[in-house]
Amino acid sequence: MQRREFNQHLQRSAIALALSPWLTAPSAFAADKSRTWRTNPFALGVASGRPRADSVVLWTRVLFSEEDRAAADEALRVQVEVFADVGLKRRVQIAEVVTDGARGHSVHLHVRNLQPSTDYWYRFKQGDASSTVGHTRTAPALNADVRQLRIALSSCQHYEQGQFIAHAEIAKQPLDFVLFMGDYIYESTNPQYAIRKHNGEEPKTLAQYRERYEQYKRDPMLQAAHAAHPWVLMWDDHEVVNDYANDQDRQYTDPQQMLKRRAAAYQAYFEHQPVLLGPDADNPANMRLYDQLSWGKLADVWTLDCRQYRSAQACRDPVRGGGRMVVQCDELNDASRTMLGNTQERWLSDSLSQSKRHWKLVAQATQISSTSVSAPVGRSYWNDAWDGYPQARKRLLQTVVDAKLQNVVTLGGDVHCNVAANLRLEPNNLQSPIVASEFVTTSITSRGLGDKPSAVIRESNADLLHYRADERGYSLITVTPQEVRCDFRTTKFPAGSEAGLKTQASYVVKNGKAGPQAI
Ligand SMILES: [Fe+2]
């Protein structure tokens, strides 16, 4: 690329994004001299995300070890190269991103002008250091006839409760993208079944959240999955704190304090993920993550934010808020309560109603089908999932009915359980037609419910065709014009090598027929 072209390219993309408005511009650039690194500054690996027909977001974060710490306040220029071949012979783009300590020396580059359905390789350079090479792939053109879309569905990776062996297998699968449904980090420590330990205490500040991401991002299997495929990301609660709802946490912390913590968590999230937008410049406690992408004519995919805008859980315990089983809770019927917030809900409803693509994949953080059980004083509901927001659930499914949509499949995580379920306007009412299909993936490592409560839930909910909380892993979703197939890839305990993963069960949703079928 010619120097002038290079400069124009910088102005168009790299600098513009590096100086996104939520952070102040670095006051001085580091001199262009070559820096000698004592330790690898790219120790957290590389990542790509948000694939579109003509663009992707590339990510890394420059990390200063103790030996390099003296330079940690400096602004840095990081070079990014994009290649059309695995041998790195045909370089198609080069750019430079300026970063500094205010953004944790994270590097985001929104690479544009790419070709649809095309493989690319990329790497970062700073001084005498080069990152590992990542692979990414763009989405098909919007009007392309696409034969297949392959997704690895994953969520809930408590670092202490296992090795990320599911990611080692994901890294080797031929995929279009990884769809991560939330709980990328865990803020809390859980000594039960722990095979390794979190560093430091529960994060509350930006520095502490950064430290937690650093620990997770150093995991080689997680790094391999990021380097192998683009990721499409959503979050759930543990990226901030367990069971939070908007500005509420379980301890009833003052909402202003809670929003400060949320701002720190959201900034750290942005600094460590290949996402396009960071926290809102005017209000850093806000960050839009919900999004929609199209896969040729084959599928529309919505990725929702089920935490930032939701109403607090219904009938909370006055001492210990957050999720719990509730019975005789009139608040559940309050139609003003929302899982997505009014703006996101309207956006989804409009966008879903107008979708003309063959499959409509609605990815959200938790479980939509019911897991309610009978209690002596009435039916008992888990108030943190959609069972706790039944009116919002009904509105979502009513949209499907009103727009006469076929081929709606919802994807979820959070509950550490593999689920295949029918979705009806009236859950578990066999007279109520099945209007959509649900797959929920189990956790990468986080422990699930015991066998007894799982069995009770399974027996209490006719809509649950498959419900197993005893194994860890991920789910392979294969979308073709004829069907959406889900293979639950699992292991009893996630330690050792990925060779231990097997297929727990497989289900398909056939074109034009709502409801998963076992195969
Ligand atoms: Fe989780």
Image (cartoon, grey):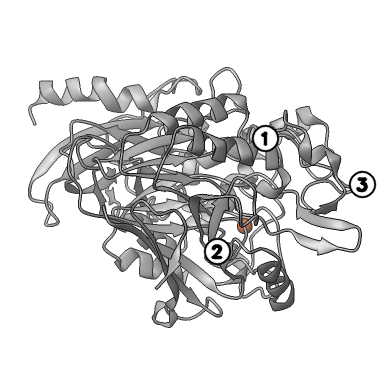
Q: Quadrant of residue 406?
A: top left
Between 461 and 268, the residue placed more toward the observer is 461
- The amino acid at mark 1 is Arg
Select label 2 or label 1 by which is in front.
2
The answer to which quarter of the image holds residue 38 is bottom left
Please state the horizontal and vertical placement of residue 114, each as a whole percent of the image: 18, 36
SS of the residue under disc 2: strand
Left or right: where 488 falls relative to 510 = right
The CA span between labels 2 and 1 is 23 Å
**Residue 217 shown left or right of residue 327 in the figure:** left
- The residue wearing badge 2 is 419
Q: Earlier in the sequence, mark 2 or mark 3?
A: 3
Question: Residue 256 falls in which quadrant of the image?
Answer: top right
Mark nearer the viewer, 1 or 3: 1
In the rendered structure, which amino acid carries the disc numbered 2? Val
Mark 3: give few (<14), some (14-19) or many (20+) Cα within 10 Å: few
Task: State whether residue 291 is above or below residue 439.
Answer: above
Does the image show residue 161?
yes
Name the amino acid type tagged 3. Answer: Val
Foreground residue among 112 and 298: 298
Considering the image in quadrants, where does the C terminus appear?
Answer: bottom left
Which of discs 2 and 3 lies nearer the camera? The answer is 2
Q: Earlier in the sequence, mark 2 or mark 1?
A: 1
What residue is shown at x 12% (from left), y 39% (from top)? 92
Q: Give me the disc on residue 310.
A: 1
Residue for badge 3: 319
Which quadrant does ligand 1 occupy? bottom right
In which quadrant will I find the N terminus? top left
Q: CA distance from mark 1 to mark 3?
A: 20 Å
Name the outermost residue toward the top: 282
Q: Position of residue 470 (x, y in %)?
A: 61, 75
